[in-house]
Image: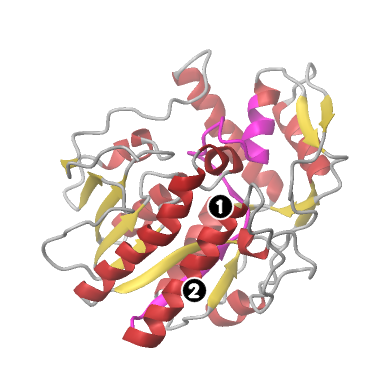
Amino acid sequence: MKVLVTGGAGFIGSHVCDRLLAEGHAVLCADNLITGREVNIAHLRSRPAFEWIRHDISKPLALGGSVDYVLHFASPASPVDYLKYPIQTLKVGSLGTLNALGIAKAKGAKFLLASTSEVYGDPQVHPQPETYWGHVNPVGVRGCYDESKRFAEALTMAYYREHGLSTRIVRIFNTYGPRMRLDDGRAIPTFVRQALQGEPLTVFGNGSQTRSFCYVDDLIEGIRRLMDQPHHEPLNLGNDDEHTVLELAQKVLACVHSPMSRLEFRPLPQDDPKQRRPDLTTAKTLLGWSARITLEEGLAKTIAWFREEAARRPGSAPARTQAAGTPRDTSESPP
């Protein structure tokens, strides 16, 4: 296949590119680097089957030749990022999804939308099945991300129903692993950075809110299986092993062996979900998939990678960008 991956220089998108290239497919990566990093795809630059374009998919993208699959992963995904870029987040979820779907329609390609567990908001149903409509504050500070993804799902289903486009929607629950930015604001990279630097680990609220954490390799396997299934309704992917945020902080401290660090409690942010765990019945039944890597195993792999990053760039968090070859110029201006 020839596959277009929007957001392909991001944390998850770059792992998707790796997997597809390993299978022998050709990959065209489009990313405007608003939150993605060139370093995430630097190791791919010499591959003849890989090409990347620096482009904001919220703007039209003209592509020559055939495309067999469009994977739409472009979007800020951490609270730090989408609170910093709320309008760009809304644009990539709406206009970006429209443009990506338009490419798929024009090329006769299949389409997969990377959605999120955030469509469930602060859920009143636990665990969350795909049939749950969610409990979202559309005008709250997190609404820019939640509602952009809910709109993207509605638009994807409209293209499926009206145009007969072969679509997939994956609702991604908390995922972690190598290539996350230490400064992206999500729990695991934040705790790891603080522990490695001997700083207090900041726990919001009393730490009783729960999350389930999926290692990135498990997620990529689930996405790859979904690509081959004619399943058009949303599908949850994540780990259903639930932990409190306080437990997570303690596990990170144990893994890093940071005697200088301690826990510091801060007020809970607005609309922060109190609990989050996927109902994986559909994924287990349809895909024969479930997460295999335990939190302890995943944390060990992730922390080892962050240590290597710190050694390569001592005294600083990994930089957002690093040269990875010259991208195709699309005359795209910053958002």
Among all residues in the image, which is located at the extreme top? Answer: 315
Q: Is residue 315 above or below residue 221?
A: above
Query: Residue visible at 55% across and 52% down?
Result: 144
Marking on residue 154: 2
Instruction: Identify the residue position indicated by label 1 in the image.
Output: 144
In x, y percent, where is residue 216? 53, 51
Residue 290 quadrant: bottom right
Quadrant housing the C terminus: top left
Q: Amino acid at mark 2?
A: Ala
- Would you call the spot at circle 2 few (<14 residues within 10 Å), some (14-19), or many (20 or more)? few
In x, y percent, where is residue 270? 74, 45
**175 falls in the magenta region:** yes
Q: Secondary structure at mark 2?
A: helix
Query: Residue visible at 36% across and 58% down?
Result: 96
The region drawn magenta spans: 165-193
In x, y percent, where is residue 233? 52, 80
Which of 25 and 197 lies nearest the eye of the viewer?
Answer: 197
Inspect this view and state whether residue 102 appears. Answer: yes
Q: How is the image coloured?
A: secondary structure
